[in-house]
Amino acid sequence: MSDHSSISLPPLTVRRQLLFALFGVTVLLAGPAIYSIGRLQAVRDIAFELHDRHAASRVAVGELRAALAEADRLQRSYIVTGDSITRTQMLEALAETRASYRRSAAPEYGVSNLSIGRTLNELDVAAYRIDELVQSGAAAEATDYFGEIRHLYGDADAAVDVMAGAIDRQSAQATIRAETIASAAVTSTLIALVGSLAIALILGFGLTQLVTRPIERLRYAMNRVAEGDFDTGAPIEVGRRDELGDLARSFESMTDQLAELNRLKAEFVSKTSHNLKTPINVIGGYAEMLEDGLYGELDERQAEAIRGIHEQVEALETQVRQLVDLSRMEAHAFTLRVQQVYLADLLLGVQRSFEALATQRDIHFEISTDPSAPATIFGDEDRLRNEVLGNLLANAFKFTEAGGSVSVQATGSRDGLVIEVSDTGLGIESASLDRIFDRYYQTGNGKRAAGSGLGLAIAKEVVSRHGGDITVASEEGEGATFQVILPIGGTDPAPGLG
């Protein structure tokens, strides 16, 4: 005996689901069509009945009436004239009455109880009797005899009228029956069609949901992964036994591997950044001691070399700090110390940090505050000053030539505090505007490529954590303007952010 529990059905693939749905819709729509064809066949049969049987019977009845009238006329004429031609025509007219009666199919119309057949036979017998009398020269007796049988023609005419009425009634009934069938067929077909379309729509909607729902979930998960979030939060349907299930399982496996790679990368960056801090600090310390003359006086060339070393050490410290911040963001350990921030103190700290650089590079540097700007906001002052405004201004000074200008303007709006950082530098090519805030992204500009590609990404992350937004507007060769919008009340830090 076979074990039925071990029998596995073949997977219901998306292709099979679509084929089954198409077959179901076809069956649903074919039902009303088959019913309509059956009803049309019934109406066609009635039309044939009206055209073939009823019409032919009506014509035969008309011919019977005409033949009776002609036989009556010819019989009277023959009695008077005794002409052989009239005699022949009389007998032919009587024969035509019997033929017309047979063609009329009278029994089919419920008039079989009529005695018209016997009447026609009696008319034949009477005709031969009259012929005998006329042939023997007894015209007077023939006339008297014709008077005795004259009522047979009246009886036959009355029976013909009954037959014509029966044919008309059955024709009318057939017409009414055809109209009833047609009307019922139209109503039934419409109801069946509407019902079939409704079921087809429900079936199509259900199939659409069955197919598009996992695709939408997978698309959402892919967008999350594309943004660097490997914890998609969307329950992709890995349990399905079709192509979409295979795709979901492949995507889940890929996401797990990417998450592991991302974890290893973050771990590597974190360890490497911490390991770099010590030698960088040592190099910076020795450079400061050499610059201060602790190891003897330096000539101008040596002093210039030490200043170059010091600048590169500061650049390394900035990149290491950015790598540490990035690893913290990826590990969801990026903290904010939200407190009341005075706008004047925030901008004053920024001004002090970049005044010397502006003077050194001969760049006009200006910070202005519009009366509409709020006096205070809630946020992390250090991160707003260093990671946001510090990164934006560092880029602005990097790409602005001597004689140019860099400005910071603070205004207020219904969305909160708006800070614009503008420069007259190289600008950003249009192809890079959509990706300028991506991690590690650098434009093709040589100066911009000298950085790590993390400053703007970190600035955007900090602004987002404050519940704000950052945008850029630029044309290549015309400078750039970064706009930062921060809510006045700040925002509650996300879980794990402090």
Image (tube, rainbow, N blue to C red):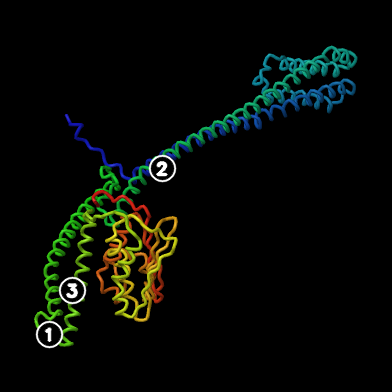
> Circle 1 sits in a helix, a strand or a loop, which is it?
loop
Vertical relation: 106 (above or below) 393:
above
User: Residue placed farthest to the left in the image?
Assistant: 295
Give the percent coordinates (x, y) of residue 274.
14, 63
Give the percent coordinates (x, y) of residue 369.
40, 65
Contact flag, marks 3 and 2 (Cβ < 8 Å): no
The residue type indicated by label 2 comes to Leu
Q: CA distance from mark 3 to mark 2?
A: 70 Å
Report the number of discs: 3
Q: Earlier in the sequence, mark 1 or mark 2?
A: 2
Q: Is residue 242 visible?
A: no
Q: Earlier in the sequence, mark 1 or mark 3?
A: 1
Give the percent coordinates (x, y) of residue 191.
53, 32
Tell me the crowding category of disc 2: few under 14, some 14 to 19, or many 20 or more residues within 10 angstroms, Cα based: some
Q: CA distance from mark 1 to mark 2?
A: 91 Å
Residue annotated with mark 2: 22
Quarter of the figure with residue 107: top right
In the figure, is residue 68 to the left or right of 369? right
Closer to the observer: label 3 or label 2? Answer: 3
Q: Is residue 268 visible?
A: yes
Residue annotated with mark 3: 313
- Identified at 29% across, 80% down, the residue is 360
- Identified at 68% across, 26% down, the residue is 171
Q: Earlier in the sequence, mark 3 or mark 2?
A: 2
Give whichever of 54, 254 is nearer the camera: 254
- Identified at 77% across, 24% down, the residue is 65
Give whichever of 303, 36 is nearer the camera: 303
Residue annotated with mark 1: 297
The residue type indicated by label 3 comes to Val
> Circle 3 sits in a helix, a strand or a loop, which is it?
helix
Which quadrant does the N terminus fall into?
Answer: top left
The residue type indicated by label 1 comes to Glu
